[in-house]
Image (cartoon, rainbow, N blue to C red):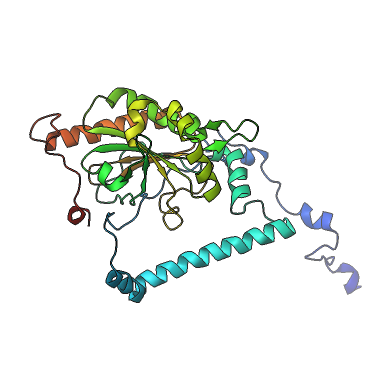
Amino acid sequence: MSLLSAAPLTRSFASSPHLRNSSKPAADPLATIDGPDATPKDALPPLSRPLGVRERPTTLIKSTKERLKDLMDTDVRMAQRRHLFVVIALLFECTLTVVARIKEASVGYFHDLNMTRKHGGKTWIAPKVLIREDKALYLPNIAGKTLENGAVRNSTEMCFGKVTVLAMLSTRVSEASLDLRLASHSINAKGFVDPTHSRYASNPLYQYVQVNLQENILKSFLVNIFLSSLRKVIPKELHPTYLVSTQNMEYVRDALGMTNSRVGYVYLIDENLKIRWGGCADATDEEALSLESCTGVLLKRLERKKPSQGDTSTVSEPTPAQST
C-alpha cells in the first residue's frame, strides 16, 4: 500500500536523443542575424604593425671581420635559424597539402595564386594616418639597375633626404605573344600612386621610385631581354628612378609585408629612410586618398626643416658613414 501511495519515480536523463534535446531552451533565431553595423566575417584587417627592418640600411659592403662577427653573434644566428625553421615548416606544409589535399593555403606559386583570387591578393588595409616616427622601421637597402642607362643604384642613396613613394613591382610575360606587361604597375601601384604623383610631381622634395623585383633567374633574364619594350611603357621622366633588381628579398619579405609575390606593394618613405605608410594589391578610394594626404604631411614637415622652401641644395645623398 505504501508503494502505491509513493510519488512516481522519474529519471534525470533520457535515452532518446530527441527527448534529451527537448529539455534545452530553444535558440533565439534572431541571435544569428547580424545588424547593419556588424563587421563582415571576411573583412580585411587593417595594417596592425610597422613595416620594415630595425637596422638602418647601409651601402657599405661588410668586411671579412664583420662577417665573422655576425657568424659569432648569437642573436644573428638565432634569427637566421628561426627564419630557416619557418621556411622548412612552410615547405613541409606545402608538401602535405599537395599529397593529402587537406589544406587550401600553401606556399609558393599556387598559394599566391589562391590568395590573389580572394580579395585580389589584398591581405590588409592601408592605414589612414602616418605611422609614428618613433615606431616606424627602416626600408632595407635595395640595389638595381636604372632603366635610364643601366647604372647600378640603391634605394638608400636615392631615398635619403626626400619624401619617396616606392612601388615594388612584378612583371608577367605573355606566353602567347611574349609581350611584356606591367601587371602590378598597371593594376596595383597605379591605383595608389596616380593621384599622389600628379599632385606632387613638381615638388623637388618628392620622388616616385619603382623597383621591378625579379628574384627568379628565368624571369630576370626575360626582363633584361625586353628592356627596350619596358622603356616604351614607362614614361621617360621616370626612367632614372626605375630600378630593375634581382636582389634576394627572402629575409625581409615578411618584415615588409610582402606575403604575395603576385601583387604590388606601395610604401611611403620619409627623408630618414623610414616606412611611414604601406599599401598592397588594388587600392581603394580611401587608401589612395590616404597616401596623398600622408605624402603632403611629410612634405610640409620636410619643407619646414629646410632653410628655404623648395631649396634642395642642402639635400645630399648619404655617404657610407651617414647610412650606418
What's the residue at 28%, 72% (across, down)?
65
What's the residue at 50%, 49% (across, down)?
259
**Which quadrant would the N terminus be assigned to in this image?**
bottom right
255 with respect to 86 (left or right) = left
128 with respect to 296 (left or right) = right
**Which quadrant would the C terminus be assigned to in this image?**
bottom left
In percent of width and height, residue 157 lies at: 25, 46
Looking at the image, which is closer to me, 70 or 81? 70
1 with respect to 216 (left or right) = right
Looking at the image, which is closer to me, 22 or 56? 56
In percent of width and height, residue 246 lies at: 44, 49
Based on the displayed image, in which of its 4 quarters is residue 11 positioned?
bottom right
In percent of width and height, residue 316 lies at: 16, 42
In percent of width and height, residue 278 lies at: 38, 41
Residue at the extreme left: 307
54 with respect to 91 (left or right) = left
What's the residue at 52%, 64% (across, down)?
86
Based on the displayed image, in which of its 4 quarters is residue 130 positioned?
top left
**Up-down: is 318 above or below 65?**
above
**Up-down: is 23 above or below 171?**
below
* Residue 276 appears anywhere in the view: yes
* Residue 274 appears anywhere in the view: no
